[in-house]
Image: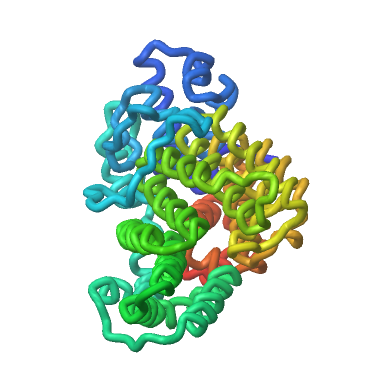
């Protein structure tokens, strides 16, 4: 099967696709630095043959994490690849995975620069690649529909809510039941329904906390933190990192005033997730390990405690992988696996969906982000998606499988995984930037895939 250039790029006068242009830039910078393929592979954690496939465009070089890794290794500006410049503190980048010496990190107050982990501005990518003519020829690719346009309807009203809207307090039992319903809507990926009621629920939770005193005040604060955590998770889905960080910070402050250590741990996870997505990976890593240390399960640990601890280990492992720390990622996912074995089965305690299947899901994600596409697929083949407890996680699983196949330059397999993701959780494919990027690539390079244009329309991709 022909797995070379997409058909559009072979026609006379066709411009070079951006994914191939990035490989040309890597090659030019490597030669300029006097590095062999093996040298660059050792620095980045890949084989020489894998680096060669990226440079020659045989395997698409579109993953933001991989692009940043090559830029760092070759000491070239991230802007050359159309990425925002990295400004976060790199000291302590490979944090220790042991729990000793951890420093608790409070929620951030000012974050001046936001970079989307799931995507960058395609227009900016095109402009900056065009300006890199000294390394290779200019690349042109039509921008995918912006996340802002796609998601404005879902996120409408959240900004106003942050500054206060009047609401009536309710009993703690009523509030807890309402939170449970919103948790379920998130986990079943019913995002339209979630968005329609979540802003008012935040207002109700705030009013309830303000009108609760005495011994129940701590419980009311923890419930308010839970609502903010749901909202944070939702904004992460919509790729609104500035708003997600504000909501996560409020979740952390509310949880610190509460009386539930597991809610506090979950709030720290929410903050760490957004810190990672905005480039502050060392801080995210430290915060996750600190949160895990505070709830480390003893012999008589409850299923809820095991689930939250295992979740923190998973997220810490993924954070290490995003930062290129392979050893830490493997150590931490091993801790999560041991915790899942203690739990004994897939469950959904504290709405974590934690268990053996979820650990495997994270192993797929970790391998994919480290560039080990084949390993990611090997893990995926061991997992029956039906065993994943929630629709949201099943959608995530199939999207990660699609990303691995995309990275491996297997478009047909990638497309089939995207269709499986749509069947599992339609809203997951409708709003996730990685899905839109992969679909855009498939539309431009593999127009013969049956039903691809219909799929693109269903997920609100612009017509080509």
> Is 180 placed above or below 448 here?
below
Name the colouring of the figure.
rainbow
Q: Nearer the viewer, residue 26 or 449?
A: 26
| Residue ranking furthest to the top | 34
Say above or below: 176 vs 459.
below
Place of residue 52 in the rendered image (x, y in percent of width and height, measured from the top left): 54, 24
Give the residue drawn at x 53%, y 30%.
98
Give me the residue at 53% from left, 46% from top.
315
Q: In this view, does 26 lie above or below 148?
A: above
Rendering coords of residue 355 (x, y %): 69, 53
Q: Quadrant of residue 19?
A: top left
Mark count: 0
- Towards the viewer: 162 or 53: 162
On-image quarter of the C terminus: bottom left
Left or right: 92 with respect to 383?
A: left
Residue 95 x, y percent position in the rendering: 44, 30
Give coordinates of residue 188: x percent, y percent: 60, 71
Q: Residue furthest front?
A: 214
Q: Nearer the viewer, residue 31 or 369?
A: 369
Residue at the image position 51 percent from the left and 77 percent from the top: 176
Is residue 454 visible from the viewing direction of this image?
no
């Amino acid at each position: 099967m022909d797995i070379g250039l997409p058909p559009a790029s072979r026609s006379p006068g066709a411009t070079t696709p951006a994914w191939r242009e990035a490989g040309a830039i890597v090659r030019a910078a490597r030669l300029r630095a006097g590095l062999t393929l093996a040298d660059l592979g050792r620095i980045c954690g890949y084989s020489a043959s894998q680096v060669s496939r990226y440079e020659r465009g045989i395997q698409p070089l579109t993953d933001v994490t991989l692009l940043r890794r090559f830029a760092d290794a070759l000491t070239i500006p991230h802007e050359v690849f159309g990425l925002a410049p990295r400004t976060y503190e790199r000291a302590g980048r490979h944090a220790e995975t042991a729990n000793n010496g951890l420093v608790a990190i409070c929620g951030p107050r000012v974050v001046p620069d936001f970079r989307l982990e799931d995507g960058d501005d395609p227009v900016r990518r095109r402009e900056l690649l065009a300006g890199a003519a000294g390394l290779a020829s200019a690349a042109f690719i039509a921008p995918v529909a912006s996340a802002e346009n796609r998601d404005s309807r879902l996120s409408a009203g959240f900004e106003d809510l942050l500054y206060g809207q009047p609401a009536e307090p309710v009993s703690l039992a009523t509030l807890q039941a309402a939170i449970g319903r919103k948790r379920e809507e998130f986990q079943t990926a019913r995002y339209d329904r979630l968005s329609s009621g979540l802003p008012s629920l935040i207002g109700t939770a705030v009013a309830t906390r303000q009108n609760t005193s005495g011994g129940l005040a701590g419980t009311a604060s923890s419930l308010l933190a839970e609502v903010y955590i749901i909202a944070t998770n939702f904004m992460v889905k919509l790729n609104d990192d500035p708003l997600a960080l504000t909501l996560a910070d409020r979740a952390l402050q509310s949880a610190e005033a509460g009386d539930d250590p597991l809610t506090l741990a979950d709030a720290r996870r929410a903050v760490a997730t957004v810190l990672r997505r905005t480039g502050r990976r060392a801080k995210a890593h430290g915060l996750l390990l600190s949160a895990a240390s505070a709830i480390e399960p003893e012999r008589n640990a409850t299923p809820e405690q095991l689930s939250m601890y295992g979740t923190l280990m998973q997220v810490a492992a993924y954070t290490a992988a995003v930062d290129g720390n392979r050893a830490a990622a493997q150590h931490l996912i091993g801790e999560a696996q041991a915790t899942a074995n203690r739990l004994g089965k897939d469950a959904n305690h504290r709405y974590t969906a934690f268990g053996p299947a979820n650990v495997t899901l994270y192993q797929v994600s970790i391998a994919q982000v480290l560039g080990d596409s084949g390993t990611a697929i090997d893990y995926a083949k061991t997992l029956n998606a039906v065993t994943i407890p929630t629709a949201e996680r099943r959608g995530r699983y199939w999207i990660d499988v699609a990303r691995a196949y995309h990275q491996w330059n297997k478009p047909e397999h990638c497309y089939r995984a995207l269709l499986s993701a749509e069947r599992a959780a339609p809203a997951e494919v409708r709003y996730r930037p990685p899905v839109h990027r992969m679909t855009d690539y498939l539309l431009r390079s593999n127009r013969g895939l049956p039903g691809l244009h219909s799929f693109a329309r269903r997920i609100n991709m612009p017509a080509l």
